[in-house]
Image (cartoon, rainbow, N blue to C red):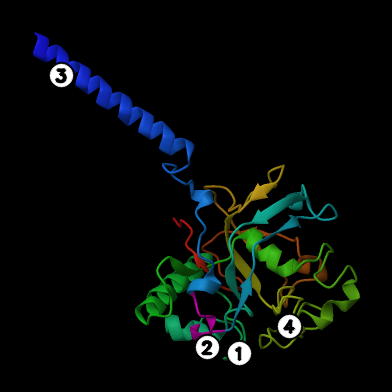
């Protein structure tokens, strides 16, 4: 009995010492497990050499901007502050027919030309292109683990289109200047044009305001959520996907930075796209 009591006392003392040690280490922050937001994620510029990419890319830094427009359609409201917390790369131009064919083997575009933007591709087609390109570039050693080629989110696209601006277009509110930056119904002569032949925006991105329509990652939501947003990716499910940017066939109103139409992901129409290199997003 006496021996058992001694063992219990020893166990109690050891437990007491262990507890004291634990609380001491915790008070010093030595046992803290950092949350996901506290672990600094490597930026693409640290892990990825854009010179090895199969087409020109522009490095985009994290930041905040006002997304949407009070002057536009209801789906562009309310204007809200959006913060993107991760750096990424985005295509300086829309994906060309030559670049598409190198990955997919066929060219579905209605207007043919190596330097013309690929068109007549569905959202589903663009996702398959990104998957194949990611696989090929990873095998070549040009794409570090954790990074993928993918479609830009709607927020990433508008952030890049605005390039620091708060006006209806990246260059201001004067619609009369649109022809310097975009191919749209008034200057396109009813056809697409080689990428990068108009002026770029302030971040060196071409054709954001017009040439072909550009698919984005997100499911479409009829209105934005109210309040500030961080790294938004749209609704979890839906029937329609967002597209952005103007087009050779559309008027200037569709070329505004905040304009956000939609369509079924299986339709082709005159759709094209540009790519992002960043961490992956969950795709269906």
**Mark 4 = which residue?**
190
Confirm whether residue 203 shows in the render.
Answer: yes
Q: Residues within 10 Å of mark 2 (few under 14, many from 20)?
A: some
In three-dimensional space, the C-alpha distance between marks 1 and 2, rounded to whole angstroms, equals 7 Å
Q: Earlier in the sequence, mark 4 or mark 1?
A: 1
**Residue corresponding to mark 2:** 98
Disc number lying in front (2 or 4) = 2
Q: Which badge, 2 or 3, comes first in the chain's sequence? A: 3
What residue range appears in magenta?
Answer: 48-55
**Sequence-first tag of 2 and 4:** 2
Q: Earlier in the sequence, mark 3 or mark 1?
A: 3
Quadrant in the picture for the N terminus: top left
Q: Which residue is mark 3?
A: 7
Q: CA distance from mark 2 to mark 4?
A: 21 Å
Is residue 49 one of those drawn in magenta?
yes
Q: Which residue is mark 1?
A: 115
């Amino acid at each position: 009995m006496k021996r058992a009591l001694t063992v219990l006392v020893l166990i109690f003392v050891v437990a007491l010492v262990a507890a004291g040690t634990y609380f001491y280490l915790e008070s010093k922050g030595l046992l803290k497990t950092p949350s996901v937001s506290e672990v600094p994620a490597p930026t693409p510029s640290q892990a990825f050499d854009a010179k090895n990419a199969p087409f020109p890319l522009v490095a985009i830094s994290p930041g905040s901007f006002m997304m949407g427009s009070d002057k536009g359609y209801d789906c562009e409201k309310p204007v809200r502050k959006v913060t993107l917390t991760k750096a990424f790369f985005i295509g300086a131009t829309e994906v060309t027919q030559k670049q598409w064919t190198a990955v997919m083997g066929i060219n579905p575009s209605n207007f043919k030309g190596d330097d013309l933007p690929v068109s007549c591709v569905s959202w589903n087609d663009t996702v398959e292109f990104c998957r194949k390109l990611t696989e090929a570039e990873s095998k070549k050693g040009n794409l570090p683990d954790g990074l993928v080629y993918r479609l830009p989110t709607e927020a990433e696209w508008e952030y890049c289109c605005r390039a620091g601006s708060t006006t209806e277009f990246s260059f201001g509110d004067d619609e009369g200047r649109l022809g310097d930056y975009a191919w749209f119904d008034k200057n396109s002569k009813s056809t697409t044009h080689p990428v990068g032949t108009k002026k770029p925006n302030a971040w060196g991105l071409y054709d954001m305001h017009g040439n072909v329509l550009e698919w984005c990652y997100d499911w479409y939501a009829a209105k934005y959520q109210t309040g500030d947003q961080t790294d938004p990716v749209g609704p979890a499910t839906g029937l329609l996907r967002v597209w952005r940017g103007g087009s050779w066939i559309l008027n200037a109103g569709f070329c505004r930075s905040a304009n956000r139409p939609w369509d079924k992901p299986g339709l082709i129409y005159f759709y094209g796209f540009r790519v992002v290199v960043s961490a992956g997003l969950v795709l269906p």
